[in-house]
């Protein structure tokens, strides 16, 4: 590696690690905040408006959405963190495994929230020509 590039990498790496850590913290914070908001909403809807069965369905959907958004941020942080360290096949394999697991979790949560496969969404949405 050229001396200028090595010096630049040493300057950038701490910033990339800090950015990655901040995004990870935001992802975890978002999941926690989402869980708190979903719980408060669950209690309010259950006690004062729609009743417990509807409140439970909304709670699961809201909690799932918060987890999905947090997972997206965690995947972004993992990618940035992997770029910050010296790339190696082992680091890329670990990143690939983490992204694969989190993508599977995201997919599973999406199916749980929507109650259908993602590719079924387009087939079930009526178009303007279908409504006529």
Image (cartoon, grey):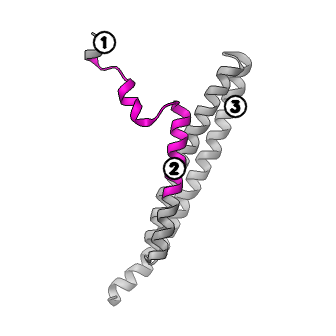
Q: Which residues are magenta?
A: 100-128
Q: Mark 2 or 3 closer to N-term?
A: 3
Q: Nearer the viewer, mark 1 or mark 3?
A: 1
Instruction: Report the label total.
Output: 3
Q: Is residue 108 above or below residue 86?
A: above
* Quadrant of res 42: top right
Query: Tag 2: Cα neighbours inside 10 Å, few (<14), some, or many (≥20)?
Result: few
Q: Position of residue 26 (x, y in %)?
A: 56, 52
Image coords of residue 28 (percent x, y): 61, 52
* Element at label 2: helix
Report the magenta stretch's main SS: helix
Residue that lies at the very extreme toward the left in this rendered image:
129
| Quadrant (top left, top right, bottom left, bottom right) of the N terminus | bottom left
Instruction: Assign a secondary structure to mark 3.
Output: helix
Residue 128 location (% of width, % of height): 27, 17
Residue placed at 31% from the left, 12% from the top? 131
- Quarter holding residue 52: top right
On residue 131, which mark appears?
1
Cα distance between the residues tagged 1 and 3: 38 Å
**Relative to 130, 6 lies left or right:** right
What is the crowding at mark 3: few (fewer than 14 residues within 10 Å), some, or many (at least 20)? few
Residue corresponding to mark 2: 104
> Would you call the spot at circle 1 few (<14 residues within 10 Å), some (14-19), or many (20 or more)?
few
Residue at image point 51% right, 31% down: 114
């Amino acid at each position: 590696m050229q001396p200028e590039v090595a010096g630049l990498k040493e300057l950038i790496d701490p910033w990339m690690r800090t950015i990655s850590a901040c995004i990870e913290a935001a992802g975890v914070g978002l999941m926690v905040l989402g869980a708190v908001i979903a719980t408060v909403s669950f209690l309010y809807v259950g006690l004062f408006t729609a009743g417990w069965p509807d409140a439970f369905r909304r709670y699961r959907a809201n909690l799932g959405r918060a987890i999905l958004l947090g997972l997206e941020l965690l995947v972004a942080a993992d990618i940035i963190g992997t770029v910050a360290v010296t790339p190696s096949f082992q680091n890329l394999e670990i990143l690939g495994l983490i992204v694969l697991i989190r993508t599977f979790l995201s997919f599973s949560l999406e199916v749980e929230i929507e109650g259908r496969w993602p590719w079924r969404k387009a087939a079930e949405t009526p178009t303007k020509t279908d409504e006529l």
